Amino acid sequence: MELQNYCGTSRIAGCSFSVYPMTDRFKEIILEALEIVDTSKVWMETDDVTTLVRGRIPHVFDVTSAIFLAAAKDGDHVVFNGTYSIGCPGDSTGDVYMAEDGIKLNLLITAGIKLETASKFSLYPLGGGNYMDTIYSQIENMRKRGITVSKSHYSTRLDGNAIDVLEGLEHVFTETEISGSSHTVMTVTMSANSPSAKGVIK
Ligand SMILES: Cc1ncc(C[n+]2csc(CCO)c2C)c(N)n1
């Protein structure tokens, strides 16, 4: 079977991610979040360290965002850590999910959840010469969407409502892919309900 024929020429995306609820109830929170989210449009596998999802970009973001929001919605301090990737040469696991349409399945779970979050993200458009231009223009994209953007070393800090930040990051990732990056990696760490005050903790 010629798997590239699925969904035109679009390529399979994926994310390796974990959520870390900082409470004694971490096990129930993680397992419940994994359970209530509709994952039928992605290939997914969970082990004791991480969860892998693979499929079309909208569904990879839909599922990872919904699992984080489901874990954090009741006010526990939860941290999400994810590595998104597209164009990684070689493997084809989950390619059959490229046949799914673009309609997200978890918008009802996430709609209306308002969570102030603090994050850092790093974008790595691999394989192109002008990668710094791509990175700077995508950071600017986040600022234009109303997210508070702060410069840092090795990553960019983002402060804002979880859904707005996650939508922005999906946009950044999609735009980088569309712009022709042959392999794009983006890392995201997002913290919700932290008891720490914003900024440098001494
Ligand atoms: C999204 C996500 N997937 C897997 C783990 C790893 N993990 C750590 S504790 C636990 C519950 C069962 O012991 C699991 C599955 C995670 N943290 N977050």
Image (cartoon, rainbow, N blue to C red):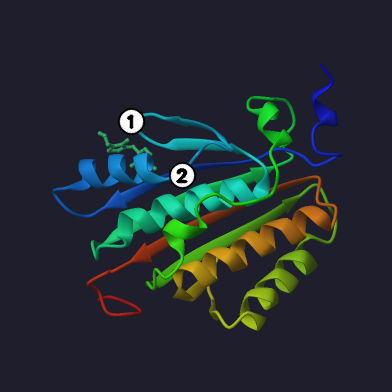
Residue behind mark 2: 17
Please report the residue visible at 45 percent of the width from the left and 75 percent of the height from the top. Answer: 161
Kind of residue sitting beneath label 1:
Asp
Is residue 7 shown to the viewer in this render? yes
Residue 161 as seen in the image, left or right of residue 123: left
Residue closest to the far top: 1
Kind of residue sitting beneath label 2:
Phe
The quarter of the rendered structure image containing the N terminus is top right
Label 2 within 8 A of ligand 1 by Cβ: yes
Residue closest to the far left: 24
Quadrant of residue 119 within the rendered picture: bottom left
Residue at disc 1, secondary structure: loop
Image location (x, y in percent) of residue 182: 81, 45
Residue 46 as seen in the image, left or right of residue 142: left
Residue at disc 2, secondary structure: strand
Residue behind mark 1: 48
Give 54 or 197, whichever is nearer the viewer.
Answer: 54
Give 124 or 148, whichever is nearer the viewer.
Answer: 148
How crowded is the residue under tag 2: few (<14 C-alpha within 10 Å), some, or many (20+)? many
